[in-house]
Image (spheres, rainbow, N blue to C red):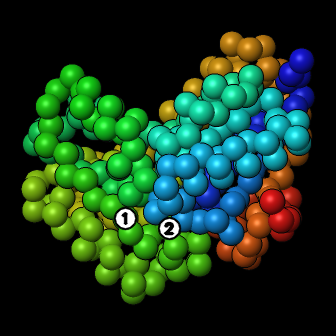
Amino acid sequence: MMKAVQPIGIFDSGIGGTSIWKEIHTLLPSEDTLYLSDSKNAPYGNKTKDAIIALAVKNTEYLLERNSKIIVVACNTATTNAIKVLRQNYDVPFIGIEPAIKPAALKTKTNTIGILATKGTLNSELFEKTSSNLSSNPIIIEQIGEGLVDLIENGKIHSDEMNRLLKKYLKPMMNANADHIVLGCTHYPYLKEKIQNIVGASVNIIDSGSAVAIQTKNILSEHNLLISGTRTPINKFLINKNKAVLTKILSDYASRINIEEEDF
Ligand code: DGL
């Protein structure tokens, strides 16, 4: 039987899911967390559905062996391709993340929204289902963020190449007068400022991070697995390649976390 003192397990293809970890840690500061950064296998976005499922299973088993009470799939690509299989095969509760096109579709005034995500997410059945079942009928400009995850994983957020790619990918959205841009990859919140500078302040940039944290809290509460009261948590990060980039992206949290390089 699961206990509240067990950690929240979180995984992503790399360091992007730390944008979700930050939301979870802010909302649930007393919870222990265990984060897996599968950077060795990043990006997931160009892999086949079967390959993504195999990696999601590997990460889930690693987190379960380390006692996770819930698994947060902090990766749109892994969620949209693998969460059904994960839920069918493991008893633990799973929280997934999908591009927030529903709220963007409800709020758009120009009836046009842009979405930036990986090929694996945009081509998935789950994304196809969500975007064809919207209550309104907005124009959706889809754009694969080819190369963006690689640059972030290699510590090149502030590079000329990043600026060049972002301008190229955002142009069709701006030309179509999109007033909302959905960030459909957990790496992309790290690009939010750059994207806002390119598209201007009047465009809303939406991600699903805080919704995932709220959902995590709700599901833990439903299962009586929330830590009650205040305590100092253990926040552990495991990465299988390039620890320095993860350390840098989490530098504001350095005193509260522990990062180890490990092969998994
Ligand atoms: N953070 C993953 C996502 O949300 C990145 C996917 C990749 O590795 O390509 O989709």
Query: Residue at left 49%, top 55%?
Result: 48
Vertical order, 172 against 134 (above or below): below
Which numbered dot is residue 145? 1
Measuring from the top left, give residue 203's x and y in whole percent. 23, 52
Q: Is residue 200 visible?
A: yes
Q: Horizontally, is 76 left or right of 62 in the view? A: left
Q: Amino acid at mark 1?
A: Gly
Work out which quarter of the rendered image holds the N terminus and state it: top right
User: What x and y, as percent, mark residue 40?
Assistant: 68, 69
Q: Is residue 198 left or right of residue 65?
A: left
Q: Considering only vertical position in the picture, is 234 above or below 237?
A: above
Farthest bottom residue?
160
What x and y, as percent, mark residue 34? 80, 46
Q: Residue at x 41, y 49 (%)?
A: 121
Q: Dots 1 and 2: beta carbons under 8 Å?
A: yes
* Residue 174 figure quarter: bottom left
Check disc 2 and give the amino acid type.
Answer: Val
- Looking at the image, residue 72 sits to the left or right of residue 235; the answer is left
Q: Secondary structure at mark 2?
A: helix
Q: Which mark is residue 149?
A: 2
